[in-house]
Amino acid sequence: MNFIEIFKVSIEAILSNKMRSGLTMLGVIIGVLAVILLVSIGEGARVYITKELTGLGTNLLIITPGKTSTSGGFHPPSAGTVRKLTYDDSLAIRRRAWLLTDAVPIVMGTGRIKFRNLGRDSMVIGTTPEFQRVRNLFVDIGSYVTQGDVDSKAKVVVLGTKVKEELFGDQNALGQVVMLSDARYRVVGVMQKKGTSLGWDVDDVIFIPVTSGQELFDTDSLFEILASTPRAEDVDRAIGQIKDILIRRHAHKEDFTIQTQGAMLSTMNTILGVLTAVLGGIAGISLVVGGIGIMNIMLVSVRERTREIGIRKAIGARNSDIMAQFMIEAVTLSGVGGIIGILLGVGLALVIPLFVTVLPTSVSVWSIVMAFSFSMAVGIFFGVYPARKASLQDPIQALRYE
Amino acid sequence: MIELHDITKTYHMGDVDIEVLSGVSLSIGQGQLIAIMGPSGSGKSTLMNILGCLDRPTSGRYSFETREISALDDDELAHVRNAKIGFVFQSFNLLPRYSALKNVEMPLIYSGIPARKRTERAVPVLRQVGLADRMHHKPTELSGGQQQRVAIARALVNDPPLLLADEPTGNLDSRSGAEILNILTDLNKRGVTIVIVTHDQNVAARCGRVIMLKDGKIVDDRGNA
C-alpha cells in the first residue's frame, strides 16, 4: 500500500470529525503561536536595544570615576584617595590620546528652568561642542554650546524640543533669557527632535557649557568623560592610552573605570538572549501540552475505530499500514496546527507593534523553523503510542468490538 | 486446496486453559461448498478464524495451496488474507464513512493497485451482485441484504480462491437471506471454494458437504466427495 493512499485515508478520518480535529489542532496552534510570538518579542527587544546602542556608536568609550572591579570580592572603600575626574583630565586625554577623535567631559544633574511664569524640571547636561558628534544629537535652530562658551563659562543654554515647547510654545526661543536655578541663561539653540531612547527622553534635556555646569552644580568634578575612536579595532589601544594618561595624572592609581559600548552591547545581548530562550521555553511547554492533547484524541480515535482496524486487517492491511494510518493522522494534526500557528504568530507579531508601540517585535526565521519542527516532533512523539496500539490490535478481538 | 492436520487451539483464561479445538484434521478441495455447523462453543468460529488466517493454531499444521501457513509472519498472513481469502461477516462489517464502491475497493488499496484500476475492477463486481445502481450509497443508506451484497463484492474483488462466510444470513430476513445464499451458490458454481459457518439447516441443505463440530472435534463430515 503506498503512502498517498494511507495519507488519503488519514485525511478523510480527520475531515470526518472536523470539530474534534479542530480542537485538537488548537492546542498545537496556541503552542506554536506562543513560541513564535514570545520569541519575537524577546528578539524585538534585543534588536531594538542593539539598534539604539549601535546608534550611539560602538566605538564609544565611557570613563567614570572610581574603580569597579569585575573580578568580584570585597574592596574596602578608600575615600579621600579616590581622585575625581576633572575637566583638565578630559583636556589631557583629548590632547594626548591621539587614537581618540573626541573626549567629551560631562556633568549632569537636574535643574529647574523658568521662563516668565512657566517652569520645568529637566535634566541638565554640561558638555563641550563635541558632544553633538559623539552622541549623535545635533542642534536644529541656532547654535550649540561653543568652545568659546566653555572657556568663558558663558551662561548660554541649548534646549531640547520638549523643554522649548513647554516654555515657549510656538514662539521663537532664541535670544530669550531663562532662569536656570538662580542664574540667568540666554537661549542660543534648540535641538533636533529625537524622541525616547532606551527609556531616556532625549528631548527633555537642556545643554550648557561644562564649565557653567560645574558652577551650577557647585562641583569641580565630572560625571563622566565620553570618548570615541574612529575605528573599532583601535578601541583596546585607545583604552590603554587613556589609562596611561589618567594613571599618571592620578598619582599612579587606577581610580577610574573605562567601559566600552561594545562590551555593554554584548552584555545586553547575552541577557536578552537568555530572556528570549526562557520565553520560548515557557511557550514550548504549551506546545507539549498541545501534543498531549493529540495523544489523548488519538487514543479515543483508535478505540472508536477498533472495528475499522479489525475490518482493515481482515481484508489484508498489515500492521505497518495501520500504524502509518494513525501516525499520519497525528502528524497531520500537529503539522497543520503548526502551520496555522506560524501564520497567526507571525501575523500577531507584525500587528502588535502597530498598536503597542513600546513592544517592538522581530520575527526570526530560526524561531519559525524551530517551532514548526518542534510541533512535528510533538506529533510524532505523541502519535507513536496510539498508532502502535492500533497496529497491534488482534483482528478477531477488534472485529468483535462494539 | 486446504489441509488441516491435527489443529488445536487453546485459550488461557486466567489460570485455566480452555481447549477450543482439539485435534481437528480436515481437507478442503478446490470448488467445494461446505457448511460448518455445531452448537455455540463448539469451536466453529475459531476454526473459521484459523482458516481465514486471522488466528494461529496452538499446534498442528495448516497448508493452503501448498503453502505452510503456520510458518508465516504477520505481514505474510495479511498478504494471504488480502489476495487469497474473502470474508463475509454476519454483521456485514462495512466502513460506514465510505460509499459501497469505496468499501469494495478497499482490499485493492492494500494490494497496491492504483485508484483508476481499483474502480475498473470494483464496478463489475458490484454489478455482479446486483448493486450497480447503488454503488455511491453509503452503507447506512442500504438495506441489510444490500449491505451483505456489498460485503460479498468486497470479498470477491481480489478474485480469491477461498471465500469464508460467518453466518452470512444471520442478520437478514428470509427473503434477503435466500438471495445471499443464491449469490454464494452461483459463485461456487463458477469455481470459488466457499466455507459457510451457520446454524441454519436450510443453508446447510444447500451445501454439498456439512461438517459438524462439537466440543472442538469434528463429529460428522457428510457429503465429502
Image: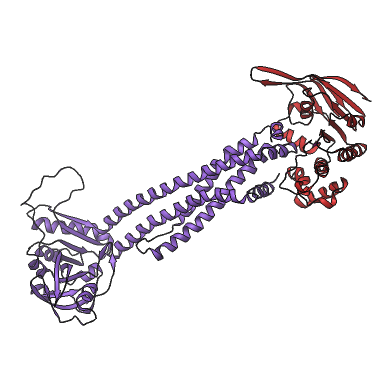
Q: Is residue B157 left or right of residue A41?
A: right
Chain corresponding to purple in the figure: A
- Determine the image quadrant of residue A53: bottom left
* Total marks placed: 0
Q: Quadrant of the N terminus of chain A?
A: top right
**Residue A154 seen in render:** no
- Determine the image quadrant of residue A54: bottom left
Q: Position of residue A305 (x, y in %)?
A: 66, 40
Chain corresponding to red in the figure: B
Looking at the image, is B52 positioned above or below residue A174? above
- Determine the image quadrant of residue B144: top right
Specify whether residue B94 is painted magenta.
yes
* Residue in the image at 28% along x and 60% along y: A233
Q: Position of residue B162 (x, y in %)?
A: 84, 34
Q: Nearer the viewer, residue B183 or A344?
A: B183
* Residue in the image at 40% along x and 63% along y: A353
Most distant residue in the front direction: B173
Q: Nearer the viewer, residue B194 or B61?
A: B194
* Residue in the image at 78% along x and 45% along y: B104
Most distant residue in the top direction: B16
Q: Position of residue A121 (x, y in %)?
A: 17, 68
Decide whether the magenta segment is chiefly helix, strand or loop.
loop
Q: Which residues are magenta?
A: B85-96
* Residue in the image at 46% along x and 46% along y: A286
Q: Position of residue A362 (x, y in %)?
A: 41, 59
